[in-house]
Amino acid sequence: MHTRYSTTSAALFTDADKTALAGKIKQWGKELGFSSLGIARADVSRAAARLERWLELGRHGEMDYMAGHRGLRAAPAALLPGTVSVISARLPYWPNAANTAKSEQMPSDGGWARISRYALGRDYHREVRRRLQKLAGRIETELSERRLPFICRVFSDSAPVLETEFAVQAGISWRGKHTLTLSREGSWHFLGEIYTSLDLPADQPAREHCGSCSRCIESCPTSAIVAPYEVDARRCISYLTIELRGSIPLSLRPLIGNRIYGCDDCQLCCPWNRFARTGDPAFAARSELDRARLVDLFAWDAGEFERRLVGSPIRRIGHERWLRNLAVALGNANPTGGREALLARGDHPSALVREHVAWALARTERRSPGRIAPVAGKRVDA
């Protein structure tokens, strides 16, 4: 969205006008369903240094785009020339089921699939961006009446943006020890940003309220949170089941349990999530993914995978990795009918799927009859 008017009219935009507009933006955002909005300066120098260290340590794994786009992350004006301010917004997503299920330690003999809460409903990328575009439209209308210039660009995890840093600077959340953003209403939310040329008054940065709590670190099934505020993605279940394209490391497969897409363990244990508000209905679970069985999901062919997951973020991993993840979960959970389901995929055209199916079958064969494998925790037999 690019709108330009004369510099003369822009000079008439006083500090009082900017403050009034900032207040309107926050109100309009809440009318669109956002739980909180704030404004930050387009300065990410502190976060950029932290990103560089993370990349140098190789903790991004195979996410080459993190290194390739580091320059864009460190320079907001490279994505939108003239960027001065960043409007950061927070949109909650369906926390009720997560609170009810608590730790979601579903019985392994039932063969339930665990899918990260954010992925159960509509794809958040489109939904958050759609609402932010509506907000940008209202801002443009407001300014056009006064013939004031407005240049902006909307993002929702859709470009190299240091969104956590902007959320902290805008005062709408702080960075938790698990590296996710936290507020007094918990962490079950999506973030989105509007880069703009408007010189709006910045809000006070958020203060951290994690204190001495270390539950997220202690609960991580794979010890991916290597230190407070530091995550090694190469060990993170979300990375292993979503970002990693190839074979899942053998030593980590047993620790994945029955998680087939992402992991919420570090959020489920967080005390702040007790105060989560009801999430947006747009992100309610679809296709009964919140109560699906591993064997049933493993039976989906490529066509059914595409049909069932239309509009879902899960589609991004494709059917091959979907089967890879399910094979690992079936090997860990060993549900009724699991062995037969695995055998049916033993000659799958994909070498990646065949490898993980073979591993799962070997794992089930090593167990004593009737033994149930744990689906969570850090100590299980490979």
Image (tube, rainbow, N blue to C red):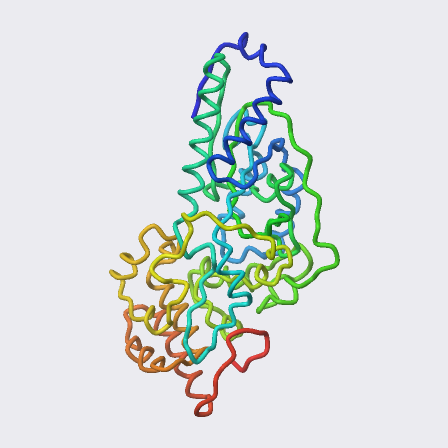
Q: Position of residue 220 (x, y in %)?
A: 60, 66
Q: Residue at x 55, y 80 (%)?
A: 380
Q: Position of residue 99 (x, y in %)?
A: 54, 61
In this rendered view, identify the residue nearer to me: 267 or 326.
267
Q: Residue reaching furthest left?
A: 303
Q: Residue reaching furthest right?
A: 212
Q: Position of residue 73 (x, y in %)?
A: 55, 40
Say above or below: 348 vs 146.
below
Q: Is residue 307 left or right of residue 228?
A: left
In this rendered view, identify the residue nearer to me: 56 or 189.
189
Q: Position of residue 233 (x, y in %)?
A: 56, 59
Q: Residue reaching furthest bottom?
A: 369
Say above or below: 153 vs 14.
below
Q: Is residue 35 left or right of residue 202?
A: left
Q: Residue at x 43, y 80 (%)?
A: 109
Say above or below: 184 vs 83.
below
Number of numbered discs visible in the structure rendering: 0
Quarter placement of the N terminus: top left
